[in-house]
Image (tube, grey):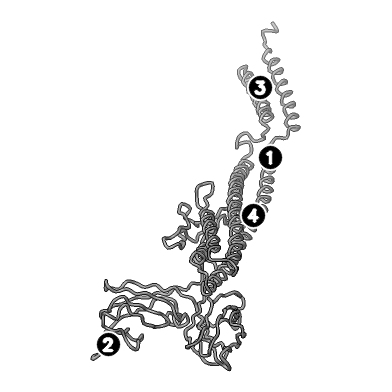
Amino acid sequence: MRISTIQAFNNGVAGIQRNYANATRTQEQISTGNRILTPADDPVASVRLLQLEQQQNVLAQYKDNLTAAGNSLSQEETTLNSVNTILQRVRELAGQAGNGAISAADRKSIAAELGQREDELLGLMNTRNARGEYLFSGFQGKSQPFVRESDGSYRYQGDEGQRKLQIASSLNLAISDNGKKIFQNITNAERVASSLTVSPAGSTLSVSNALVQDEVAFAATPAFPEAGISVVFGNPDAASYEVFAYGTATPALATGKLDSNPDQSDKLVFRGVTLQFDGVPVGGETVVVGAKSAISVAASGNPAQSLALAVTDPAATYAAFTPAGKLDFTIVAEAAPSTDFNFAAPLTLTPGFSSAATAYPLTVQSNGLSITLAAPPVTGDTFTLGRKAEEKQGILDTIANLRMALESSIDSPAGNRATRDAVAAALSNIDLGMSTVDSVRGEIGARMNIIDTTQVDNDDVTLVNKGVQANLRELDYAEALSRLSFQTIILEAAQQSYVKISSLNLFNKL
């Protein structure tokens, strides 16, 4: 085969360049520590490395989310711990206020500290996080969750949302709790009301507010009657009583008897509900216990008219408004020759409303309500009454109610009984509130445990990911150094052979 001089030169140069490129590439691998310098070096491994890097970025985001979730939950737990401390102090103050030996002035001093604790608690419930968002407002992070109304009550204006962060591929963790769940949806121990509906002449019997102090017994089988109960005195003697389901006279669900000491309170406990009796019955008294209701009234079309309402028979009111909703009281003229007014059927009164202006303001009784009209009615006056069950009561409202009761307390037997009832209700509701707060703190602790275990799993997966990347990308230095040495020898041989071949010339033989 005939090889031209230029071909020999080109082949030699190409071989040197090829060997030099191989040695240079190996040297670059050694200097960077990477086996793959371009995707062409190993296309399959390059694709796998890209997938692993994407996974690593996701794991890094999960790690950041875990840190943020831990910080948020730690702040919430710290805040709730402070709330619990305040509630414990409030409970101590309530216990002190219930001491019958202290004066009304002492109770007002306790009320002053309760007011300070109330403000402190309101501040904690409106706590912000490091981003300036309210902790307990649900999704409405920019809206203050709790506000004090002009009448001293409190309103929650957040929502019931729960912010979450993704901390693993299929795990979203709640990092907040809404204030309605923690501080507002507290079971109200005073959600039943009591009323002495029949009090014969000569009777000094009085009844305390009813309290649900045993939730298990209240909801057990048999449960406390939904329509309420009637406690009737007089069988077989004036001090004895029987308990009936409201609206019935048989069978007696329970019986009891007051002791002979009129200065000592007697307690009735029936299916989780507690009542206290004071005074001396004469027989024939009836005490009704039923669901406590808040009654609202819409304005009449008659500008001169207004209604004032008071619940005198909670069970009758509950029956009239069951299910909880609205009830229309429409005032109509009675048939001639009467000039009086009455409620439209099926709600009727005997006698009806007088048409004489001098009779007003006038109070009538209907459906367990005491209704006071300010001015004579006109035909067509309609009042829409709405009932709202008071099954829940916020912690702040519980403290505010106790504070206001202590501020208005007086040194008298009736004042002492009112204070006793207010303290008993507050203690029960504070205990329920503390139980709810502790329950949420337990949930936070469980979430913190999830963060710890997820963080460990995340670190383990990250370590495995980095190991796989190292196996695919990193260089085997021993193999590379051996290869570089071999490639250097080949390059030197190519260079020397090229010099020898390029020096061959026929003119040298002449």
From the image, tell me which residue sits under label 1.
470
In this view of the protein, can residue 163 be seen by the observer?
Answer: no
Q: Secondary structure at mark 2?
A: loop
Q: Residue at x 61, y 57 (%)?
A: 85
Of circles 2 and 3, the one toward us is 2
Tell me the crowding category of disc 2: few under 14, some 14 to 19, or many 20 or more residues within 10 angstroms, Cα based.
some
Which residue in the structure is indicated by mark 4? 448
Label 4 CA crowd tier, 10 Å (few <14, some 14–19, many 20+): many
Label 4 close to label 3 by CB (< 8 Å): no
Circle on res. 239: none
C-alpha span from label 4 to label 3: 65 Å
Residue type at mark 4: give it.
Met
Q: Residue at x 70, y 41 (%)?
A: 471
Q: Nearer the viewer, mark 4 or mark 3?
A: 4
Q: Nearer the viewer, mark 1 or mark 2?
A: 2
Secondary structure state at the residue bearing disc 1: helix
Q: What is the C-alpha distance between the residues marked 1 and 2?
A: 96 Å
Q: Which residue in the protein does label 3 denote?
A: 16
**Residue 154 seen in the current view:** yes
Q: Which residue is mark 2?
A: 334
Q: Nearer the viewer, mark 4 or mark 1?
A: 4
Ranked by sequence position, the earlier of labels 2 and 4 is 2
- Secondary structure category for the residue under label 4: helix
